[in-house]
Image (tube, helix red, strand yellow):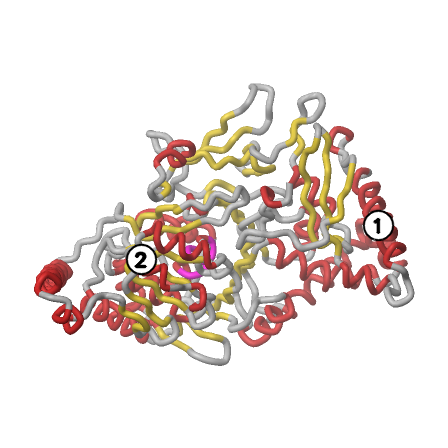
Amino acid sequence: MTIQLENNTLAALTERSTSLYEDKLLVSNIGEIEITYAQAKAKIAHIHSIFEDLGIRQGDKVAICSENMPHWGIVYLAVTSLGAIAVPILPDFHSNEVHHIIKHSEAVAIFVSKKLSAKLNEDDFSSSLQYVFSLESLEILEDKTPKQSELVIKGTEKIAQFKAKAMQLTNRQSDSQTLVIDENDLASIIYTSGTTGQSKGVMLSHKNLIAQIKQAESLVKITTDDKFLSILPLAHTFECSVGFLVPFSNGASIHYINKVPSPKIILAAMQKVRPTCMLSVPLVIEKIYKSKVQAGFNKNRAVKFLYENLTCVRKKLNKIAGKKLQESFGGQIRFFGIGGAKLSPFVEAFLLEADFPYAIGYGLTETAPIIAGAVPGRTKVGTTGIIAPHIECRFEKQSEDSRDGELHVRGPNIMMGYYKDTVRTAEVLDEDGWFNTGDLGYIDDNGVLTINGRSKNVIIGASGENIYPEAVESVINQNPLVLDSMVYEVDHKVVAKIHIDYDQFDEAHNINQTSDSALHDDILSLLEEIRTEVNTQLSSYSKITRVVEQREPFIKTPTKKIKRYLHI
């Protein structure tokens, strides 16, 4: 169904969906709470009533700090449909980052889950914050505004201030009766946790977010029969836009896991929900591939040899494994969207040969997020699909001979800018509306986009060749004993930090009967074996000269990209 709205605002979308799909299930915690679209509408009205009583109105910022749960999206819709501004906070953010976001965004209220409530403290109320709500109950937990009884005690000056506040509240309530939200009004400020360490408040308008829904609609059709299983944080644009707003606009249901979504827990949830649609970052499907598929092939030496050396055998085994994978996912998956980082070409080649219905998406928080995508059946290994409708693109090349250029895009989904940061906004967004993605790539003759890596990460070879760390890392990560790797430059040489799977390593080495020094030597030998094997698959100019053991897991962003600046 093509979405028709009176205007391109989340208020219009909320009214349309909650009225059109009243009896349909909207959100649930698996095996627990279930909320229909009609019930969501009533909860949104309840929140609006509380906001009106407190004087929270259009233009005010309201933060949401919680793990995924049914009320998260309902609060997000309640805030934005009132013309207020939602400020999602990623649950993995340190408490210091939470404090910074509350103050920097000038949030007047915050909805927080019981699990994350400890991240707040009294200092947060030294800025604009006045109210704390429970995301579970939707009721107010703390009210830091001065009460009339307190003001009387403190004298006539304070009473005058209270009267002024009461008058302001009356005016606000009067204003709310004639609420007008424009599509260009700010709807959300999303604070990124990027690989450079510079958190920025991305400002997305109502128009930006509605444009995403319509762009997603051109890629895949979602119906009221679809069931989404949500495993990515709702505070991230990918999950909020594509994993919540898109199904919400089409009457689909969304199911959340009330636990940390490890691969084991995700697979168990899939059996219960039997979802038709899911969104994932590459790391999740890559872990499932290594533990469920690759490990199975490697158990038998003969099978492993045939799989690696005979194409016909590999394809046949991949089809069998693909059917088993579908069954383990509940048997109903028709759309498995992967985005947020580059998917390993080896894992993607398996998904393609296994006839697994994966889709590839590419975008950034600043583009709300979709720029390009390829739906199941139209994917091509290593590419990110075609540019979404209504988005213009161009490539800024270092030289005419270069195939790759830095991708710039323009369209209705491009952010308004970074909140309170005109300098960094000007660095990526010009006066004509062109946004510099910072990614290097090209479009082929069929209009298919390939992204090879970040321009700031590229290593220049001795003869001027572009060496993409992400491409080298994908080869390293193919090794079943490698959990993660990071490639970077030291003294004009390619170096790799590798974090191995110590559990598997311990199984292969009797740690109770082997000395620490011998184990260390074995790890160094393993790393050198990986380096030698990887170099056989790389061009001469991109070969790894040295490997370093990364003993602790890499620190990552919510989309599981390594924060490189912390490890170089």
Among the 4 quarters of the image, the one containing residue 34: bottom left
Pointer 1 or 2: first along the chain: 2
**Residue 242 lies in the magenta stretch:** yes
Seen from the viewer's position, the closer of residues 279 and 532 is 532
Q: Nearer the viewer, mark 1 or mark 2?
A: 2
Seen from the viewer's position, the closer of residues 449 and 223 is 449
On the question of residue 383 being in view, the answer is yes
Q: Is residue 434 above or below residue 498?
A: above
Return the mark for residue 126: 2
Where does label 1 land, which residue? 526
Which region is colored magenta?
A: 238-244
Dominant secondary structure of the residues highlighted in magenta in the image: helix
Point out residue 276 in the picture as x, y percentages from the top left corner: 52, 66
Q: How many marks?
A: 2
**Figure quadrant of the C terminus:** top right
* Furthest residue in direction top, as rendered: 400
